[in-house]
Image (cartoon, rainbow, N blue to C red):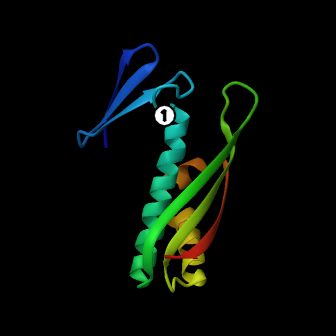
Amino acid sequence: MKATVKWIGDELFMGTSESGHTIVLDANGGALAPSPLENILISLGACSSVDVVSILEKTRQDVTGCKVDISATRVESVPKLFSDIHLHFIISGNDVAEKHVARAVSLSADKYCSVALMLNKSVKITHDYEVVKA
């Protein structure tokens, strides 16, 4: 897997993936686009959500939506690394069993989500969930 990042002016950078997709990042605290650290949170949420939805679909749960709210805390010293990240999954659907959601979230965090597995070597990652009727 490869990617390229190009400075496009001020504190804006354009990342291009090997598959040809682009994203703009703003090192100026996310004023014009997500900051690189915000992008990490988005990537973590996306990676985890892919796993959760896939696992729920394989268990034949009637999932109609998956949203994850992510909150993070950073250390005060430079570099301002993440110390803690919390993911709150909101799963909507019809007759979705909580036991399947709990299992899916746990499997994603502990076994499948590449982004979480990389981050949790130095960041405390926690998660919870709620199930709402569609």
- Residue at position x 56%, y 69% from top? 105
Q: Is residue 16 left or right of residue 70?
A: left
Find disc 1 in the rendering and name its residue: 34
Q: On screen, 58 above or below 14?
A: below
The x, y position of residue 19, in whole percent, is: 24, 43
Is there any visible trace of residue 31 in the rendered image? yes
- Residue at position x 50%, y 60% from top? 48
The x, y position of residue 90, in whole percent, is: 57, 66
Give 77 or 42, whichever is nearer the viewer. Answer: 42
Q: Amino acid at mark 1?
A: Pro
Of all residues shown, which one is farthest toward the top?
10
Q: Is residue 44 left or right of residue 62?
A: right
Q: Is residue 123 left or right of residue 31?
A: right
Give 102 or 122, whichever is nearer the viewer. Answer: 102
Circle 1 packing at 10 Å, graded few (<14), some (14-19), many (20+), is: some
Of all residues shown, which one is farthest toward the front?
134
Q: Is residue 2 left or right of residue 33?
A: left
- Residue at position x 45%, y 66% from top? 51
The x, y position of residue 131, in whole percent, is: 58, 75
Q: On screen, 134 above or below 124?
A: below
Give 101 or 66, whichever is nearer the viewer. Answer: 66
Tag 1 secondary structure:
loop
Q: On screen, 67 above or below 95?
A: above
Q: On screen, 51 above or below 55?
A: above
Query: Image quadrant of residue 8?
Result: top left
- The N terminus lies in which quarter of the figure? top left
Query: Image quadrant of residue 106?
Result: bottom right
The x, y position of residue 24, in whole percent, is: 38, 30
- Residue at position x 51%, y 23% from top? 27
